[in-house]
Amino acid sequence: MQWSISIGRFDIALAVMFLSSFRAMPQQGHLEQVKRIYFKIRFRTQEPSTTLVSMSRMFDWANTAYSNPSEELPKNDPPPLGKWITLPYYFDANLMHYVLSGKAVTGVLHFYNKTPIDWYCKKQSTPETATYGAEFISGRTCIEQIIDHRNSL
């Protein structure tokens, strides 16, 4: 299953990571979960629809610490050539995924236009006591990866 992830089935990475923790002592039901991963999850290439996202509350950031943002760009980058590329990304944290250790799991997906390019799924190194902390770590990880992708392009 890890080989399948490496050739592009990133949609099963979280489930495989979770089931991998039971390799030393699998229990009843784990084989059924493995079968479900192989036969039920489909690869979807369309961009997710954002029509259900409500933008009813717009915020004025002018009088906050986040006003006047600037983007850090390399000084010696060449001028862009070719078509415009949009870099959508999705990240999330699963707080208390591992109940015994209290650690969350970070999941990140990166797209170039509508094509999934990169994924990241890893247990966080520190336990967090609130969703805010786990999401903040996931967001920081995602931003670092976005900077790498932009510099690569």
Image (spheres, rainbow, N blue to C red):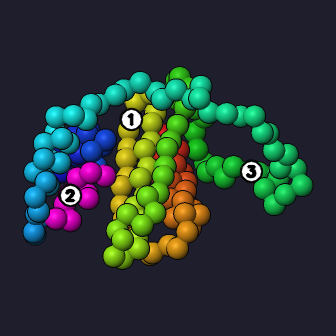
Position of residue 40 relative to residue 5, above or below, is above
**Other residues around mark 3 within 10 Å, as few (<14) / some (14–19) / many (≥20):** few
Any mark on residue 19, and which? 2
The answer to whether any part of residue 65 appears in the image is yes
Say which label, 2 or 3, has the lower sequence index.
Answer: 2
Q: Position of residue 16 (x, y in %)?
A: 23, 53
**Marks 2 and 1, how far apart at CA:** 24 Å
The residue range painted magenta reads 14-22
Badge 2 marks a residue whose secondary structure is: helix
Q: Residue at x 81, y 44 (%)?
A: 59
Q: Position of residue 88 (x, y in %)?
A: 52, 37
The residue singled out by tag 3 in the image is 70
Badge 1 marks a residue whose secondary structure is: strand
Position of residue 50 relative to residue 97, above or below, is above
The residue singled out by tag 1 in the image is 116
Closer to the observer: label 2 or label 1?
2
Q: Residue extending furthest front? A: 28
**Marks 2 and 3, how far apart at CA:** 42 Å
Front residue of this view, candidates 133 and 25: 25
**Other residues around mark 2 within 10 Å, as few (<14) / some (14–19) / many (≥20):** some
Q: What amino acid is at disc 3?
A: Ser
Q: Is residue 3 left or right of residue 79?
A: left
Closer to the observer: label 2 or label 3?
2
Say which label, 2 or 1, has the lower sequence index.
Answer: 2
Q: Residue at x 26, y 59 (%)?
A: 18
Q: Assign the magenta stretch its main secondary structure.
A: helix
Badge 3 marks a residue whose secondary structure is: loop
**Marks 3 and 1, how far apart at CA:** 27 Å
